[in-house]
Amino acid sequence: MFIILFNLLALAIGLYSIRRKRIIFPTFVLFILYLFYSPVKWVFSAFSMNDLLVDEILVEIQNAVYLEKFKKQTERKVVLLPQCLRSSDCHARCDPLYGFVCTKCGRCDVGEITKEAEIRDFKVFVVPGSSFVKKIFKEYRPTSCIGVACPVELSESMQKTSVIPSQGVYLINDGCFETKVNVSDVVLKMELVSPIPDGESLLKTVTLYDFEEKGGI
Ligand code: SF4
């Protein structure tokens, strides 16, 4: 009974936090929702509710919690993109260590994100799978990370990569083939660390998070 109450409370607080951009008790919400992740998702599915809400709460709370640390990292900042973002007509070669090497041919958004990343001193990796993420972390040793994926993968991978501050951005369509992301959402995350002159900055257009419980996790 207490477990159900804790989960309902964590979901309610998480939902309030992301809707109002006012983060409260993030440690409690993350702890409970990760601990009971599978049962909570099952309950959502059983009642025909959108279980992605659980993942979205986890990602948004982590984004907020890691925001200040993420903004302070100035070296070896990386963007990890899923290979499904590539055009079906992509001719990029796959490096056995670092994944696909984008030539910025213009057939998909990966090229656009890569160009924006170069301006802002971020390194982009287009990864064919989680084994590549492990290799990149081992060899390149990033200090911060922007990850692009579907909500389920993001919530799982952000928990695994919590050794460095990260920010997650959702794909806007799913399906593992020619997926899409809002490029400006990714650029906005880069601008948190490497802002461009005031007049052109996307940062002016968004509300960042406010914390009621300081310190995060
Ligand atoms: S922009 Fe890069 S990832 Fe996209 S199709 Fe061209 S080479 Fe491939």
Image (cartoon, grey):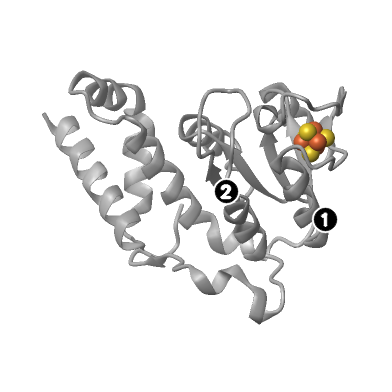
Give the secondary structure at mark 1: helix
In the image, what residue type sits under mark 1?
Answer: Glu
Can residue 13 be seen here? The reply is yes
Q: Is mark 1 within 8 Å of ligand 1?
A: no
Is 19 above or below relative to 92? below
In the rendering, which numbered label is found on residue 182?
A: 2
Q: Is mark 2 within 8 Å of ligand 1?
A: no
Give the Cα distance between marks 2 and 1.
18 Å
Q: Earlier in the sequence, mark 2 or mark 1?
A: 1
Q: Contact (CB < 8 A) between labels 2 and 1? A: no
Q: Nearer the viewer, mark 2 or mark 1?
A: 2
Give the secondary structure at mark 2: loop
Residue 172 location, x and y as percent? 50, 39
Horizontally, is 118 left or right of 25 in the view?
Answer: right
**Ligand 1 picture quarter:** top right
Residue 182 location, x and y as percent? 57, 48
Horizontally, is 209 left or right of 18 in the view?
Answer: right
In the image, what residue type sits under mark 2?
Answer: Asn
Q: Residue at x 16, y 31 (%)?
A: 4
Q: Residues within 10 Å of mark 1 (few under 14, many from 20)?
A: few
Residue under circle 1?
118
Residue 20 location, x and y as percent? 30, 62
